[in-house]
Amino acid sequence: MAILINGKEVAASVREKVRLEALDLKEKTGIVPGLAVILVGDDPASKIYVGNKKKACLEAGLNSFEHILPAETSQQELLELISRLNEDPAVHGILCQLPLPKHIDERAVIEAISPRKDVDAFHPVNVGKIMIGNFDFLPCTPAGVMELIHSAGVSVSGKKCTVVGRSNIVGKPMSMLLLHENGTVTVCHSKTKDLAAECREADILVAAVGKAKLITADMVKEGAVVIDVGMNRDANGKLCGDVDFENVAPKASYITPVPGGVGPMTIAMLMRNTLTAAKLTAKL
Ligand code: NDP
């Protein structure tokens, strides 16, 4: 039976470390890391995420600046707000909650955020830096996955890693981080011919698709490390991942649950990125 990787515990320890480092930064420089979160519209899930980010900031001793804008906000108005936040010395990190209403060009918004304040690491400059391996920030979810892998004492070097999903937010940067740690990486997607065979090769399998129980026990190698990024609802409306946890866990060496696995890590890494951005300002 697999050992459970407890994302709640790992995330709590990352957040506590951020809190202590933020305190130290304040004592030495007077700087309090500040995160500005922009929400356009009233998507209920996004509202919850934004609320959670504010709570996490306050717990870690960071300043939180919320900008809740109506759904009719024009792209120009949003870009003007971002421009002001780029210039605001109290704001070290800027995050615009996605998805945005359809009349706003997501790319233009991401590219308007100063790369030095881009704590989501979605700006092309930061994406390029990640590719080169010389980065200030890592995207929160893939960075959180790496933290979980490290917390289990698993070394990536020389391992066969399969990432299922190739989004810009999760799959692609995930594969790059595994590559930086010397994994031999395969990236699968909706056009992959034999997904089961690709997954069975993996010593480390990361599922980031958004399809409940896509990864079944017959697709997993005995002793594999299985990381489930997926967040779905099953037929009963219960939160579940992309992995058929019940049947995969007996075969895996380590596995992350949903909920309580990757999810809590994303906000913890956002706090860490905000601290990093503040340290960049202080040139530490
Ligand atoms: P996207 O929808 O952007 O990407 C999904 C990827 O899965 C695509 O690359 C797609 O392939 C691939 N895919 C779809 N169907 C299949 C299939 N049958 N076989 C193989 N690959 C397939 O999703 P995200 O990357 O944004 O998110 C993925 C999941 O992770 C979601 O459940 C999301 O909710 C969750 N998530 C969780 C976070 C957390 O904090 N825990 C944070 C972010 C996301 P193609 O490119 O060919 O279309």
Image (tube, rainbow, N blue to C red):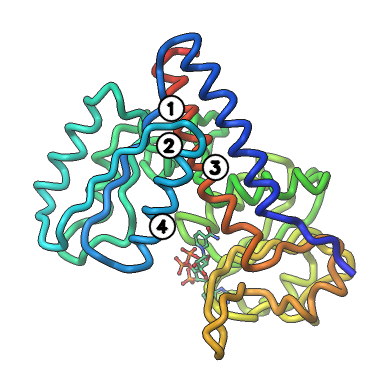
User: Quadrant of the rendered structure where residue 143 is?
Assistant: top right
Of the two numbered discs 3 and 2 in the rendering, the one whose residue sits closer to the viewer: 3
Vertically, is 171 above or below 57? below
Q: Secondary structure at mark 4?
A: helix
Q: Earlier in the sequence, mark 2 or mark 1?
A: 2
Residue bearing the label numbered 2: 126
> Which dot marks residue 277?
1
> Do tag 1 and tag 4 residues touch (Cβ < 8 Å)?
no
Q: Earlier in the sequence, mark 3 or mark 4?
A: 4
User: On the picture, is 127 further left or further right than 96?
Assistant: right
The Cα–Cα distance between marks 2 and 4, rounded to whole angstroms, is: 23 Å
Residue at point 61% right, 72% down?
Answer: 241
> Which dot marks residue 269?
3
Vertically, is 225 above or below 121? below
The Cα–Cα distance between marks 2 and 1, rounded to whole angstroms, is: 13 Å
Query: Would you call the spot at circle 3 few (<14 residues within 10 Å), some (14-19), or many (20 or more)?
Result: many
| Disc 3 residue lies near ligand 1 with CB under 8 A | no
Residue at point 61% right, 62% down?
Answer: 187
> Do tag 3 and tag 2 residues touch (Cβ < 8 Å)?
no
Residue type, numbered disc 3: Met
Residue type, numbered disc 4: Tyr
Q: The N terminus is located in which quarter?
A: bottom right
